[in-house]
Amino acid sequence: MATQRVLPQSKETLLQNYNKRLKDDIRSILDNFTEIIKTAKVEDETQVSRATQAEQDHYEMHVRAANIVRAGESLMKLVSDLKQFLILNDFPSVNEAISLRNQQLRTLQEECDKKLISLRDEIAIDLYELEEEYYSSSCGQWDGVELPLCEAFHRQDIWGSPETTSDPSCANPEDTDHLGTQESIQCNLNSHGSSTSEQS
């Protein structure tokens, strides 16, 4: 059970004023509505003519209806003042709402952290399995040297592409030297044959 808070004197007086305004407005609405119902009753003949009495009753109804409207507007203003009073002075409720929101956000943060940690562990396991598969296969060897995973696949893509195969500029330097040696030998043989023919 929540303990009743002790309000300062100014706030206590303000609340008493609100309570008095509420009772006065409700009493005004009830009294004016009762008088309007009484005015609708048809009375016997009096010294005042019926037309005069009807005009007087009509005017009284208008005045009392205006009083009811004024009391209703005063009640609406009272509701607005009460809301403003709660917003400006109800600090425990505001602090409780802030604490509740902080707790909800912390719970959400913990859930996100758990999901991120779980995702990190799954990625680490998958990466370990990929590395094991890579190093146990022939893709991880290049001229007897173990290459990193990305470098091995990069070289494999370069040498396996049709552009590299058709373009001599992208060939292996050792293969290029070997082809150049064969071309030199062929040119020497051709020149030697030509000189022999001329001498004969």
Image (cartoon, rainbow, N blue to C red):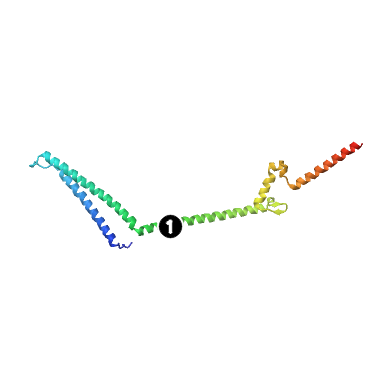
**With respect to residue 34, does 198 lie above or below?**
above
Quarter of the C terminus within the rendering: top right
Q: Mark 1 points at which residue?
A: 102
Determine whether, in the image, residue 85 is placed left or right of residue 196: left
Q: Percent position (x, y) of residue 95? A: 38, 59
Q: How many marks?
A: 1
Question: Percent from the top left, x then y, of residue 180?
Answer: 78, 44
Residue 96 image point, x, y percent: 38, 58
The amino acid pointed to by label 1 is Asn
Residue 144: x %, y % from top left: 72, 53
- Identify the residue at horizontal 88%, vertical 38% (top origin): 195
Query: Residue at (54%, 55%) from the top-left corner?
Result: 118
Residue found at the very far left of the displayed protein:
47
Q: Looking at the picture, tell me which residue is in the foreground, 90 or 120.
A: 90
Quadrant housing the N terminus: bottom left
Q: Is mark 1 on a helix, strand or loop?
A: helix
Q: Is residue 44 above or below residue 20?
A: above
Q: Tell which of 87 and 114 is nearer to you.
A: 87
- Left or right of 134? Residue 174 is right
Circle 1: is it few (<14), some (14-19), or many (20+) Cα within 10 Å?
Answer: few
**Residue 198 figure quarter:** top right
- Which residue is rendered at x = 20% and y = 50% of the image? 28
Q: Name the residue rendered at 59%, 55% in the picture.
A: 124
